[in-house]
Image (cartoon, helix red, strand yellow):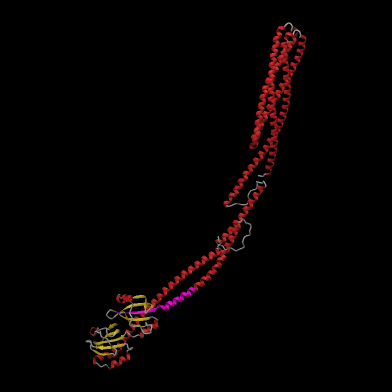
Amino acid sequence: MKFKSIEKKLTLIVCLLLVVSIAVVFVSTILLSKNHSDKLVQDKSAVSLAMLKNEIISEGSRLGEIYRYFESSGVAGNTLLTKNVDNIALEWDAHKGGESDFAVLAKKDGTIIWNSENYALTDVDFASVSETQYTIGVVADSGAGLTLQYITPVIMYDTAVGVAIIGMNLTETDYLDSLKELSGAEVTLFSGTTRYATTVQNSDGTRAVGTEMAANVAARVIEGGNIYCGTADILGNNHFVDYEPMYDIYGNIVGAYFAGYPSEEEDTSFLMMVIIAVAIATAATLIVSFVLSIVIKKTVAKPISIAEQLAENMSSGNLHVPDSDFKFANDEIGRFVLNLEKTKHDLSSYINDISRILASMADGDFSQTTSVEYIGDFTEISESFKKINSTLHGVINNMNASADDVMTGSNQIAFGAQILAEGTTKQATAIDELSSSIDSISDKIQSTADNAEQANKLAAESREKISEQNEEMETMLAAMEEIRSKSVQISEIIKTIDDIAFQTNILALNAAIEAARAGDAGKGFAVVADEVRNLAAKSAEAASHTNELISASVEAVTNGVQIAENTAETMKAVMEYSEKTDELVGEIYTAAAEQAEAVRQVTVGIAQISDVVQQNSATAEETAASCEELSGQSRMLKDQVDQLKA
């Protein structure tokens, strides 16, 4: 995604807001100015209309001044009384205001005594003129048109002798031109809806007399009797206008007063004002935008750029970059950057502290603790290190103790296995000797059986060979003694085997205890200890069985010796007891057979004991080797654990 500078965006936004604000202010100002200007022009139009009405009033006052001169000089009354018009004609010529002025002196009955040359009134009712007060106002006459008249009774000697009318035809435009020159407004007197006298000119420069009032204006002013203020099209040109109904001396609307200003000049002035305002607003916008861009660049863009670079370094893991030497303002951005730099310093100190602790752990030293104060959410790191340190301290101490126990136990087991191996070796040797002795006993017992059989067959010949029997008896006594001696030796060997089995059982029990203390490391050795204990049990059982057989053999041999001794003692009486010889020989034969069977069983037991002893020997050797390996492993474990510090 394309990167957009916040400076550009902020400057653009501010400039747009500035432009919009200036535009809103500009448009509002223009509209208000336009409305104000229009109102001013409209007010000027109203003032001009008031000036027009005042001008009409002034003209009426002027007409009254003329009559008052006639009255004070007595020329009006004398003319009516004497009907001499010379003086009044001279005075009129001297005091009339212009060619539009007219005058008439008449009797109450309507008889005209004198009138000016331009007198053209046709609708005058002289009889209705008040005898006590004058009347001044506009009169619409069918013959003279729209006129301004001063109508007054002529008093002589406190008696109304006639009527005097001093008037002015409102077609006069001099005062209108003067008013236009003074106010700048176009002024018009309407007779009905028709322009009667005006300063408005046609395109050819002639006065626009006779043109009609706009229908909507006429409806409001002439027909409705209301004032009209606003804009109106006058001969194709827009004007700010004021219309006011014109009342005659009888209170009837006979026309209207008009004053207006053309809007062209106002529009041109307004357009120039708009152009100037636009130029000023544009220049102000550019200047303010330039100043704002500089201010934004210095107070916003530069700090944000530094903050962005700092944040980028932090996100990349570069926490050792030096701090900026930019002088930040004491505002939100400045405080943000300063807080960001403080965060960088805190993170750097945290990471350095964590790296130090982890490096020590990598070297086997778990005794290091935090050296800086962790704040906020970082306190969990400090708590975690404390928990790790406490846990590892206990584990390492337990491992040290276990390693010591394992090494001690393995040494004991190795020593016991060595003793067991030596004992089994001796046991095997003893078994071999016992086997040889048993073989010898078996051979001799078999020989005894054979001899007994022969003795049984030769019993009949015993008497003849008594001498030979005596010698053989002595030989048998010696053999019996040897058998007895060998049986005693076998009994001692069996006792030795039983002692070895007992010691083996005790050793296996100790080995099982030590294996249990070693935990998982001693599980394999526990199996070996169980097998050794089983073999010891079997050895003890075989030795017990063999001991029983040997006891039986010893007892049988003892009986044989006793018989042989008795036989020797009674040899002298053999001849006398020859009848009993057969029975005794039979008994000897039976006993010899039993001895042969017993010896056979002893031979089988000895073979079993030999097998067991051989198995014990092999197991003892394997146990010794395993104990030696376990001892080596325990020493290695002890060395490894000794490297750990907690």
Above or below residue 598? Residue 19 is: below
Residue lying farthest left?
Answer: 109
One can see residue 570 in this view = no
Magenta span dominant secondary structure: helix
Residue in the image at 73% along x and 14% along y? 451
Quadrant housing residue 234: bottom left
Give percent across and percent down for residue 69.
30, 89
**Total marks drawn?**
0
Residue in the image at 30% along x and 86% along y? 167
Residue in the image at 39% along x and 83% along y? 182
Residue lying farthest top?
Answer: 576
Q: Quadrant of the N terminus?
A: bottom right
Viewer-proximal residue among 227 and 571 = 571
Viewer-proximal residue among 161 and 466 = 466
Q: What residue range appears in magenta? A: 254-279
Above or below residue 535? Residue 130 is: below
Quadrant housing residue 223: bottom left
Give percent across and percent down for residue 372.
62, 52
Quadrant housing residue 175: bottom left
Give percent across and percent down for residue 81.
24, 91
Above or below residue 19? Residue 629 is: above
Residue 187 relative to residue 337: left or right? left
Viewer-proximal residue among 472 and 331 = 472
